[in-house]
């Protein structure tokens, strides 16, 4: 089955700096890659996703890149703000395979 | 609001007891996932159902079982509860069994005392 590895497990950045979280996946049949943000005690919420037919997708300060050849994808957050502090999960799924999550990255944005 | 409803929100029970967690998926979604999240941990996949049938199984204990009913709601049954079963249990729903967005409910916080 699919295996998703996520790095780093913790990330601390200063407000205004950029943050990058990286994930690799094992199943070349995976074609859907969402990112979720989970604030303390709350549900994971979908913040951005990308499908395998595109290499990059952007939504304001958030962007996701996908390298199908290398089987890795990354989340980029620019101009970080304190409210970006949360745990971020990447995931991968194929048309006929379930969503598999990475182990999460705790992002701390310091003032 | 994701449209996924979980009940109850909080549950406190004693060791050895049995509880049932309920999940109503978003309207039109056929797939339901169950996850366990212990304090400060990741999302541990338990089981997935699609249109009433089990599709995938994770590290679900034998003391745990689940089902999805004809109206597509799902229940997760936890029996012979142990202190270590205390966790946040999430369900998520998606339109299909793979390759599409999954939306999470607000979770059920289970405390075993």
Image (spheres, rainbow, N blue to C red):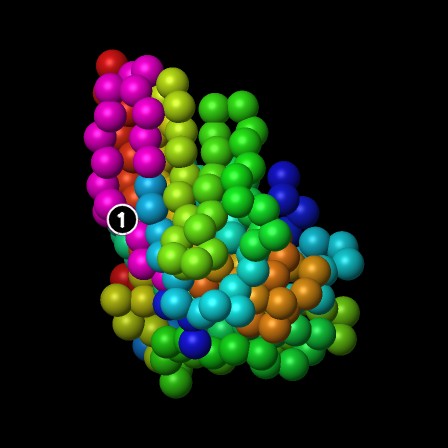
In the rendered image, the quadrant that contains the C terminus of chain B is bottom left
Residue shown at 76%/55% (left/top)?
Answer: B27
State whether residue B35 appears in this view: no
Residue A8 sits inside the magenta stretch = yes
Residue shown at 44%/51% (left/top)?
Answer: A67
Q: Percent position (x, y) of residue A57? A: 55, 37
A30 with respect to A75 (left or right): right
Is B43 in front, or is A81? A81
In the rendered image, the quadrant that contains the N terminus of chain B is top right
Q: Which residue is mark 1?
A: A7
Q: Percent position (x, y) of residue A14? A: 24, 19
Q: Is residue A51 above or below residue A17?
A: below
Q: Among all residues in the image, which is located at the extreme front?
A: A69
Main SS of residues in magenta:
strand
Q: Residues within 10 Å of mark 1 (few under 14, many from 20)?
A: some
Report the number of discs. 1
Residue bounds of the magenta highlight: A4-20
State whether residue B41 appears in this view: yes
């Amino acid at each position: 089955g699919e295996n998703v590895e996520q790095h780093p497990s913790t990330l601390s950045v200063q407000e205004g700096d950029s943050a990058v979280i990286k994930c690799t996946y094992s199943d070349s049949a995976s074609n859907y890659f969402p990112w979720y943000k989970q604030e303390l005690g709350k549900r994971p919420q979908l913040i951005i996703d990308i499908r395998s037919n595109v290499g990059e997708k952007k939504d304001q300060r958030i962007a996701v890149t996908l390298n199908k050849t290398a089987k890795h994808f990354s989340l980029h957050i620019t101009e970080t703000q304190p409210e970006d502090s949360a745990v971020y999960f990447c995931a991968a799924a194929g048309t006929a395979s379930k969503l598999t999550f990475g182990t999460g990255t705790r992002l701390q944005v310091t003032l | 609001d994701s449209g996924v409803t979980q009940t109850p929100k909080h549950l406190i029970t004693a060791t050895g007891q049995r509880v049932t967690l309920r999940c109503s998926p978003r309207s039109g979604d056929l797939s339901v996932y169950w996850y366990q999240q212990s304090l400060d941990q990741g999302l541990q996949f338990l089981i997935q159902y699609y249109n009433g049938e089990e599709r995938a199984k994770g590290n679900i204990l034998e003391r745990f079982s689940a089902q999805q009913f004809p109206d597509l709601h799902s229940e997760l049954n936890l029996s012979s509860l142990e202190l270590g079963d205390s966790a946040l249990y999430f369900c998520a729903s998606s339109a299909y069994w793979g390759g599409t967005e999954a939306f999470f409910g607000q979770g059920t916080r289970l405390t075993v005392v």
